[in-house]
Structure formats: structure tokens, C-alpha cells
């Protein structure tokens, strides 16, 4: 158990507050049942922070984040803030907190609950048994590279430009995380790059090869990102752990999410070197369905489980939450994104309540 047990909760925008409320119910229950001694503080990030503090990430929020063991985040962004300059948009707050806290290792597990094999748009036989871990580098690459901007070129035309760069040490530290993860799983690591075109990823491939001998038990392979996108929908079960840069990881993890039935099922952990981390669903703030009680809270609830596993070192509490989510799916309760015939439509809060009830009955039966 980490020494500091403070959790900063950042509900964010759109459906963020609704899904985070359900994860809080679940965390409150395990906090009690496992005597974890967690305490919670709330803050603002993204659009809600712009409304309250005038910036998407206020210094005071960042300071509380630094003093916390972990952060639970909903989602940020929405049409209300779309017209702001990109430097002050809600998404900047998210990128800034990842960068300030050095949360370079983003773990995105795409696991198909067997109950949802029919909810995927892919054939059940293609996705059943799916268990992939995408390890996305989160604080470098083209999302952070400089120079960047929009300038006037020599023809007097506006030109947008970004920089895709990765240093050896940045590649090595994410590579080592991915190898370690693979060594605890099926021991296969696929590094995804575009080394036939981009120098930054030629180096990426070289560094992955250089560190591979330190993990003789792990089989390393390389794949170009365009092929990886195709293979993910063609034969996703060929993958165990995938490691890739910030932008490719962003894109491939959305594709992987759909394999699990809905992006509403995909949790994530963003970890710093010392194991502190931020936990958030992979999906966005879905402003179109905000306030309707129809958002799927499972990705956020499962993110809370990852927090218990990776930062707070209470895997038994994480297991209990994940098993409870499975039993709620067994009951047939579904939000619209994972609904299929014969199931029962349920609201966001009903799913959270059902997970808590399952936790309670699992405890009662010992
Ligand atoms: C994600 C999101 C973010 C990202 C956006 C909201 C900035 O798409 O976490 O995948 O691109 O990292
Ligand atoms: Mg994304």
C-alpha cells in the first residue's frame, strides 16, 4: 500500500461527472470493505477548470495532484470550449497534467468480457478470448515535440507544422515497461512503428532491439503501424502486448477498444516512474449524451480497479471490482453502447449500484 492515500478526483466535462460518481461509489465500498484508508479530494480539469479557474489546469490543482498518490479522471472537452485557442483548450490541461507529473507509461488493456462477444461489431469468433495490453508512450512524440505551430510559408500561405521526436532514453524507459509487462503475461511484445518512413521510429526500433536481450523470455516483433491497424481488426488475438509511441497508441487503442464491444469498456493507467499515476477511461467526454444517464461507467470503474492494482498495491480489491463488473454483465444489465437483444437496459447509476451490490454479496459470502 502506498504511504500517501490521498486520491485526487477530477470529474472533468461531459459525461465525466456521471461516470466518476459511479467509480466513487465503488471505491467508497472497497475503501470500507478492505480498510484501505483512502481519502478523496475533488478538483477541476479541462473545460470545468476553464469555467472555474480560467485555465484548463490551475496551479493549485497541479499541486494537489503532486501531493496525491493517484488521480481518478473522468474525461475532458466539449463544444462549449471548442472555439478557444488550442493553447487553452480543455485537452491542453490533460496533456499538461500528464507531462507535469511525468506520466509517460500509458497502459490500455483491451479485454473482452465473454458476455459482450455479441456487442462487438466484429464477429464473436474473431474477438472472443481477446486480451491485449497496449502500452502507449504518453509524454513525448509528436504531441509534445517542438517546434510546432501555424506559420506563413514562403508562398504567403498558412502552414501547420509539428515535430515528431523521441530520444533514446524516452524510448528505452517505455520499452522496459512494455517488456516487463509482457514478461508477466504471454511473453510476446510487438513494437509498432513507421520505420520505413520516419527517422524517429527508426531509432525507436533500434532501441527496442537493443534492450530486448535483457528480457530473453520475451519474444519481440516489429510491425508498421498501418499493418498493425489492419491486423488489429483482422486477427486481433495474435497480439499480447503492443508498445508504441504517443500518436500511434492513441489511434490503435481506440480501434482496440471497439474489439471489446465498446470504447465504454476500456480503462487506462498513466504511470510515472515511482508508480504514482492517473487513471481514466480511454473514451472522451461524449457531450452528445451528457446528462442523460446513458453513459457506460465500466471503463471508469475498471480504471479505479487499475488504480488499486498499480498504484495502491491492493490487487485483491482490484480483482473484486473486476469480478463484480463481470457478474453485473452476467445479470444482463447494459447501457446502450453494449446493449444486445435479450439484455436489460440500465442507466449509468444502476450499473454503478449493481457493481456495489455484487461487491457486497461477494464479501458476505466470503
Ligand atoms: C486519449 C485522448 C486524448 C489523447 C485527448 C483527449 C487529448 O484521445 O486519452 O486517448 O489524445 O491522448
Ligand atoms: Mg484517444
Image: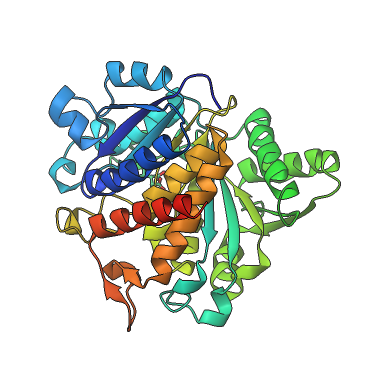
Q: In which quarter of the image is residue 86?
A: top left
Q: Which of 28 and 134 is in front in this view?
A: 28
* Residue 121 x/y as whole percent: 42, 77
Which residue is at a point 35% across and 55% down the rendered structure image? 357
Residue 259 or residue 152, whichever sits in front:
259
The percent position of residue 29, horizontal first and vertical second, equals 37, 42
Residue at coordinates 25% horizontally, 38% vertically from top-left? 12
**Relative to residue 343, is residue 239 drawn left or right?**
right
Quadrant (top left, top right, bottom left, bottom right) of the N terminus? top right
Query: Where 73 sits versus 324, above or below?
Result: above
Question: Please, is residue 315 above or below residue 126 in the view?
Answer: above
Q: Would you say 360 lies left or right of 224 here?
A: left
Residue 285 in view: yes
Q: Residue at x 80, y 43 (%)?
A: 212
How many marks are shown on the rendered structure?
0
Q: Is residue 122 left or right of residue 80?
A: right
Residue 310 placement (x, y as % from top left) = 56, 37
Question: 34 left or right of 45?
Answer: right
Residue 73, horizontal then vertical, whole percent: 35, 38
Quarter for ligand 1? top left
When the figure is inspected, residue 341 is found, relative to residue 268, above or below; the finding is below
Front residue of 157 and 356: 356
Foreground pick, 344 / 96: 344
The type of colouring in the image is rainbow
Residue 154 visible, this orientation: no
Amino acid at each position: 500500500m502506498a504511504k500517501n492515500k490521498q486520491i485526487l478526483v477530477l470529474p472533468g466535462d461531459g459525461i465525466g461527472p456521471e461516470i466518476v460518481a459511479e467509480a466513487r461509489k465503488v471505491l467508497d465500498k472497497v475503501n470500507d470493505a478492505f480498510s484501505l484508508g483512502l481519502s478523496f479530494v475533488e478538483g477541476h480539469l479541462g473545460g470545468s477548470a476553464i469555467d472555474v479557474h480560467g485555465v484548463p489546469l490551475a496551479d493549485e490543482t497541479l499541486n494537489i495532484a503532486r501531493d496525491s498518490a493517484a488521480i481518478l479522471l473522468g474525461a475532458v472537452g466539449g463544444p462549449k470550449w471548442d472555439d478557444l485557442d488550442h493553447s487553452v483548450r480543455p485537452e491542453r490541461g490533460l496533456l499538461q497534467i500528464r507531462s507535469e507529473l511525468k506520466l509517460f507509461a500509458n497502459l490500455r488493456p483491451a479485454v473482452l468480457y465473454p458476455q459482450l462477444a455479441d456487442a462487438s461489431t466484429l464477429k464473436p469468433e474473431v474477438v472472443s478470448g481477446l486480451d491485449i495490453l497496449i502500452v502507449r508512450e504518453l509524454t513525448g512524440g509528436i504531441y509534445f515535440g517542438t517546434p510546432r505551430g501555424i506559420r506563413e510559408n514562403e508562398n504567403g500561405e498558412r502552414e501547420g507544422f509539428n515535430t515528431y521526436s523521441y530520444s533514446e532514453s524516452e524510448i528505452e524507459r517505455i520499452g522496459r515497461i512494455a517488456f516487463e509487462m509482457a514478461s508477466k503475461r504471454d511473453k510476446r511484445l510487438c513494437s509498432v512503428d513507421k520505420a520505413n518512413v520516419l527517422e524517429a521510429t527508426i531509432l525507436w526500433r533500434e532501441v527496442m532491439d537493443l534492450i530486448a536481450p535483457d528480457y530473453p523470455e520475451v519474444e519481440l516483433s516489429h510491425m508498421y503501424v498501418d499493418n498493425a491497424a489492419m491486423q488489429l481488426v483482422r486477427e486481433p488475438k495474435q497480439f499480447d502486448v503492443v508498445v508504441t509511441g504517443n500518436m500511434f497508441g492513441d489511434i490503435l487503442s481506440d480501434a482496440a477498444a471497439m474489439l471489446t464491444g465498446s470504447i465504454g469498456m476500456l480503462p487506462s493507467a498513466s504511470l510515472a516512474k515511482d508508480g504514482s499515476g492517473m487513471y481514466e477511461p480511454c473514451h472522451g467526454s461524449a457531450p452528445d449524451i451528457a446528462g442523460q444517464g446513458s453513459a457506460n461507467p465500466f471503463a471508469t470503474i475498471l480504471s479505479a480497479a487499475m488504480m488499486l492494482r498499480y498504484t495502491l498495491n491492493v490487487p485483491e480489491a482490484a480483482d473484486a471490482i473486476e469480478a463484480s463488473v463481470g457478474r453485473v454483465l452476467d445479470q444482463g444489465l447494459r447501457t446502450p453502447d453494449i446493449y444486445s437483444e435479450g439484455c436489460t437496459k440500465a442507466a449509468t447509476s444502476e450499473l454503478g449500484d449493481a457493481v456495489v451490490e455484487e461487491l457486497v454479496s461477494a464479501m458476505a459470502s466470503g
